[in-house]
Image: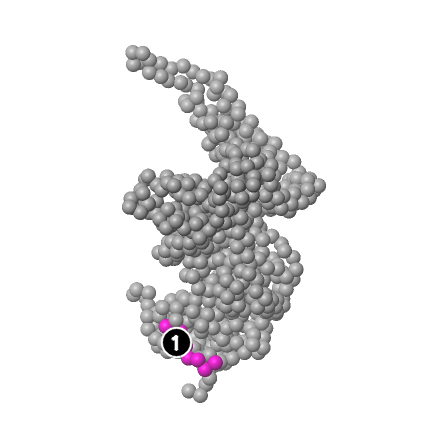
Amino acid sequence: MSRDDILSVENLSMRFGGIVAVNDLSFSAERGKITALIGPNGAGKTTVFNCITGFYKPSAGTMRLNNAGADMRLEKLNDFRISKLAKVARTFQNIRLFPGMTALENLMVAQHNALMKASGYTFLGLFGVPSYRAAEKRAIDLARNWLDQIGLLARADDAAGELPYGDQRRLEIARAMCTEPALLCLDEPAAGLNARESAALSELLLKIRADWGTSILLIEHDMSVVMEISDHIVVLDYGVKIADGTPQEIRDNPKVIAAYLGAEDEEEAIAVMEADT
Amino acid sequence: MAATPAIPRRGPDVAFIFKKALISAVVALVLFSLMIGVRTEAGPSGQLIYWTRFGDLAAMVAVVFGGSIVMELLRYWWGPVDTVRIVPDGAAKALAVARRGIAPVLLIFTFLVPVIFYDQRYILDLGILVLTYVMLGWGLNVVVGLAGLLDLGYVAFYAVGAYSYALLATTYGLSFWICLPLAGILAAFFGVLLGFPVLRLRGDYLAIVTLAFGEIIRLVIINWQDLTGGPNGISGIPRPSFFGIPLTPGDDGLAHKLDIAFSPTHRIVFLFYVILALALLTNWVTIRLRRLPIGRAWEALREDEVACRALGINTTTTKLTAFATGAMFAGFAGAFFATRQGFISPESFTFQESALVLAIVVLGGMGSQLGVALAAVAMIGGFELFRGLDQYRMLVFGVAMVLLMIWRPRGLIGHRAPTVYLRHNKTISAELVEDARA
């Protein structure tokens, strides 16, 4: 394959008892690009995410993450190691910030592993060695920079739980970015946002891709966001990949339309599409 | 629940208060009519005799009626945390100043206690007891307040510390200052030991398992007679020396060396400063840890464990370090307890102790150092203060607890101070902060 893929998922299957949530799924995400994973409700998108980010152990298949020459097998890592070693960060469909901590503290927690090392696993930090102080200052600067990027610098010292919904969504993305990920996985980042906030989100994601070169994998139902920013789209239905291509290809794919509109069969969908144009 | 009302009310709602008081009075009437109103007894030949006490009943109902009004008014004036309060501006400002000054004043006063009350052995002993509980409260605060792990078996680590010192000192003759860190390390080891099986548990389930762990330690101590002496305990535990110089009347004692008259109070004063130093060490370490990545990880763990994992935080080691740190402080306190008493037995390490320490942490406000210290003073000191009330002591105590939970459901100091800030160090309202009950 000539493409430079950061993530390649091969023959991924996830079964819960008798239910097959994801069936023999293969797709890849290109480095430095935005890949979207779409599909109707219950198609298995979040299950794929949970497999990639280590919250589920897949029943079968491989997931390869190629970052800076190192080849990681995600299905063999578990839990926190996916974020720590493979540098895959994620956000959640229902926001999971630390509501009782300030926006700044949320971003500091995200830099835990780097700061932990700098504090000599707490022992040096307890006595306030200068190298730890310097590391903490750098961490605060990084957090400040991200707060500035998402326009929340003025609210840095407010509790995350007090922020408006749209700000919380952006803060969660900033928090994921503070782990300095190679691959950023966003689970419905535009859910519950109004049109203006969605547009700002698209802008933020494009900026992340352009300025940091971070590869992005996102699940999204808001087609205006998906079609605008995605470089590549993978469509799932009933745990099976039904289409894979550029936004334009997906837009014209009869199978996708059938899946979304619930048409009886493909011919009918094609008829619907032709009637549209 | 305690959301800010949209329109601040002007005066108390008289009709509402009366209605509530009336309902309370009716409930009291129904409840007490048989309990107080009618008194029955078996007569001399076995028949039932009874007489009525309607006067007492009326008094009781009146007390409930009046009490309900007073309570509503108090609730109205002070209100629960974060509701609009009708305290005048000046008074609020004075309160804020007092709040800032309370910690240093308390600390200075504590330092001066042995000077002021040098002749009052009772006060000194009480001070040592209170400081021991302050230290235990601060230690448990790491586990419950910061990491949000509800631990009902904290006394187990206190026991491990006490027995570690007692056994090491009586068997190998090691001095207090060598045993103290060893007791802390051993207790921390037991903390990790408890931590492993409970890693997946949270909330109530965790509380039950830790409670069982506390009982297991106590039962092992009772039954392992060869090592621990079983229910007889261990006696003749060496008293601490002043860094090698014993506090005895003999020629090699401290008093003789300093050329002053020997007094048994010297040892008490010394013990007082030892526990004060240990408690302050606990406080200092906790405050430092909170501002380090590990402390933030503990608090993040309390807020949302799943998010922690997604950020690459090893939740296993984070939980274990919280258990170990909390246990270590309990171990120090336990070693101190053993050396102060000179005798320990399993009776000192019952579930009641765990419950008391947990009550101190909850009452003080989870995560607040000053709150825990105040709660320890109120709980232990208050308990002694009401000794004169005999059998009503528990009643007074219970009423005080209920009132506190009505006005301050998140403890005396329920809000949270951020560990790092850019511009303003704003405190975070208790409503937003998760707690161990979740």
The image shows residue A265, relative to residue B289, as above or below, that is: below
Q: What is the x, y in percent for residue B97?
A: 67, 45
Q: Please give the range of residues in magenta.
A: A68-76
Kind of residue at disc 1: Arg
Furthest toward the front, the residue is B251
Q: Nearer the viewer, residue B289 or B97?
A: B289
Disc 1: which chain?
Answer: A
Q: Give residue B12's quadrant in the image.
A: top right
Residue A100 is at least partly visible in this image: no
Q: Residue at x 54, y 30 (%)?
A: B68
Q: Residue at x 31, y 42 (%)?
A: B230
Q: Nearer the viewer, residue A243 or B81?
A: B81
List the residue tagged with mark 1: A73
Residue in the picture at 62% in, 64% down:
A152
Looking at the image, which residue sits at the far top?
B45
Residue B267 image position (x, y, % from top left): 50, 40
Residue B284 lies in magenta, yes or no?
no
Q: Is residue A69 magenta?
A: yes
Who is closer to the viewer here, B23 or B337?
B337
Q: Is residue B298 left or right of residue B12?
A: left
Where in the figure is residue B90, as x and y percent of width and height? 71, 41
**Which element is circle 1 on?**
strand
Rendered position, A84 above or below B163: below
